Amino acid sequence: MPKLLLKHPRSYALAILLGLAPAPLALAAPAAAAPARVQAVQIRNFAFVPAVVTVAPGTTVTWTNSDDDPHTIVATNKAFRSSALDGGDTFSFTFNTPGAFQYFCSLHPHMVGKIVVKAP
Amino acid sequence: MPHDKLDRRGFLHCAGWTGAGALFLMNGGVAASVGLDAALAAPARRGRTRPFTFLQISDSHVGFDKAANPDARGTFVETVAKIRALPAKPDFILHTGDITHLSKEAEFADADAILGEAGIPVLHVPGEHDALDEGGGKAYLARYGKGTRGAGWYSFDHGGAHFIALNNVFNLRPGGLAHLGDEQIAWLKRDVAGLSSSTPIVVFAHIPLWTAYADWGWGTDDSLQALALLRRFGSVTVLNGHVHQVLQKVEGNIAFHSARSTAYPQPAPGSAPSPGPLKVPSGQLRSVLGIRTATLVPGRAPIALVDTPLA
C-alpha cells in the first residue's frame, strides 16, 4: 500500500467505502505534503516575544495581544499594518518575500520587533 | 500685556475649592482670544477684576472595560458629576487626551455625551488611543479639529494667559518617544513670537514634554526644540496626561505636570514589567483616579497644585 498523506481522514474513509482506489486521492491532494508553516509571536508586557524570529518564506506569523492595553503591528516599510488589537485579539501576515521586516507598535513606539524571512 | 493684579477676595474664594481636575485661578486681564475664541465665547464674559477658573481632566479611555476598571465609563460619569457640583463654574475644561480607548465612533460619541453634561466648553488634544481609526486620527480631527492648524494644534488667549494645544501622538515613529514634528514647532515659533515674556503660558499635550521615563516611551523626542521657544517666558505650565498618575518636574520657569486618569492608574516609572493598566483593590480605585486643583496667579510662578482623588 502506498504511503498516503491525506488532509481529511474522513474523505479517505469515504473513498474506502465507495470502493475507490486510494491512489487518485493522493494525486488530488499534493499540497498536503508540505506542512503549513506558522509562527506565533506574543505581545506581553508591552513587548514582542520573541522580538526577533527567523522564518521560511511562506510562513504565516500570528501576533496575539496578551496585554490589557491595545497594541498594533506596523511594518516600518509599510508592508503590513494591523488595526488596533485589544486584549486577546490576533493579527496574521504571511511572509512570502525573503528579507528582514522591522515592525513596531504605533501606540507604543518603543515596542519594536523583526521578522527575518529566509529559505531554510 | 498688562500686568494682572490678583483679586484677593476671588483668590480666597477659589483657593478653597477642591473639585475634580486642575483648577486655575487667574485675574481677569485682557481676554484677547484668538483661534478657538468661538468655542470660548460660550461662558459669560467676566469683568477684569473677577478671577476665572478652568479644569484639566485626562485619559477617560471611554470603552475600556478590563480588570483595572471594568467600568471606566462610570468613573468618567462620576468625574463629570463632580464638575457639575463645583461651587464655582469653571470657564472651560481641558481634556489632555485618550478620550476613547479604541477610537471607535461610538466611544467618541459617548464621551461627548458624558462631557456635554458638564455644561461648559471642553477643549481637546488627542491621545494615541484617539488615533486608532483607519485614518490614523482622521476621526478625531473630524470631530474636534475644526478651526485648528495642521494635525489639530491651536492656541487661544484667555484671561491674560496664552494657551497652546499641541499634538504629539500622530505618526509616532518606531523605537522612540512621542513626536511633535517640524511643522508644528515652526507654527509654535510663529504663535508665541508676538507675546510679551510676562504672558503666562499654559501648554497642554497628551504625552509628557519632558522625558518622564524613556524605557516606556514617556517623553517627546523633539520637545526641547519646542521648550526652547518658551524659555523666555516668566511662567510656563505644561499639562499632560498619558501616564495616569501625578508626576511633576520644574525646570527653570517651566513646570511640568502629569495628571491622573479618570479611568485607571498606571504603575510608577520602572516599578512594574510594563506601563499597562494597574489593577488595585476595587475599594482603592477612586483613590488613584484623576483629581487636581491648581491655582495660577499671573506674575507669580509657579502655579500651586492640589491633587485630590476622585473619592
Image (tube, rainbow, N blue to C red):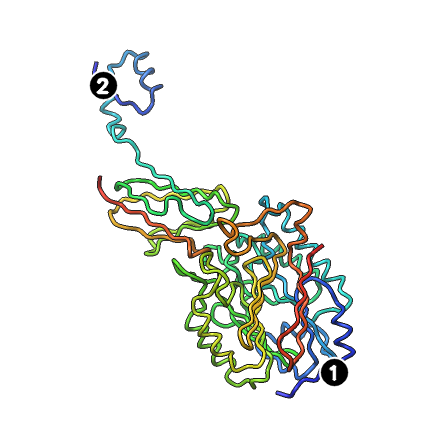
Residue extending furthest toward the bottom: B2
Instruction: Tell me: B71 left or right of A16.
Output: right
Q: Amino acid at mark 2?
A: Lys
Report the quarter where the C terminus of chain B lies. bottom right
Respond whether the residues carrying marks 2 and 1 are from the same subunit: no
Labels 2 & 1 near each other (Cβ < 8 A): no
Q: Residue at x 66, y 66 (%)?
A: B22
Q: Position of residue B33 (x, y in %)?
A: 61, 79
Q: Amino acid at mark 1?
A: Thr
**Quick check: A91 above or below B140?**
above
Instruction: Tell me: B285 left or right of B254.
Output: right
Local crowd at mark 1 within 10 Å, few (<14), some, or many (≥20)? some
Chain where mark 2 sits: A
SS assignment at label 1: loop
- Disc 2 target residue: A3
Report the quarter where the N terminus of chain B lies. bottom right
**Quick check: B22 above or below B2?**
above
Q: Position of residue B93 (x, y in %)?
A: 65, 67
In the depicted view, which residue is nearer to us: B260 or B124? B260
As measured in the structure, the alpha-carbon distance from the residue carrying label 2 to the one carrying label 1 is 95 Å
In the depicted view, which residue is nearer to us: B32 or A9? B32
Q: Residue at x 64, y 47 (%)?
A: B71
Instruction: Tell me: A99 left or right of B124.
Output: left
Instruction: Tell me: B3 left or right of A70.
Output: right
Query: Which quadrant would residue B181 be assigned to in this image?
Result: bottom left
Q: How many marks?
A: 2
Q: Position of residue A14 (x, y in %)?
A: 33, 16
SS assignment at label 2: loop
- Disc 1 target residue: B49
Judge depth for marks 2 and 1 and give the one in front: 1
Q: Position of residue A66 (x, y in %)?
A: 48, 42
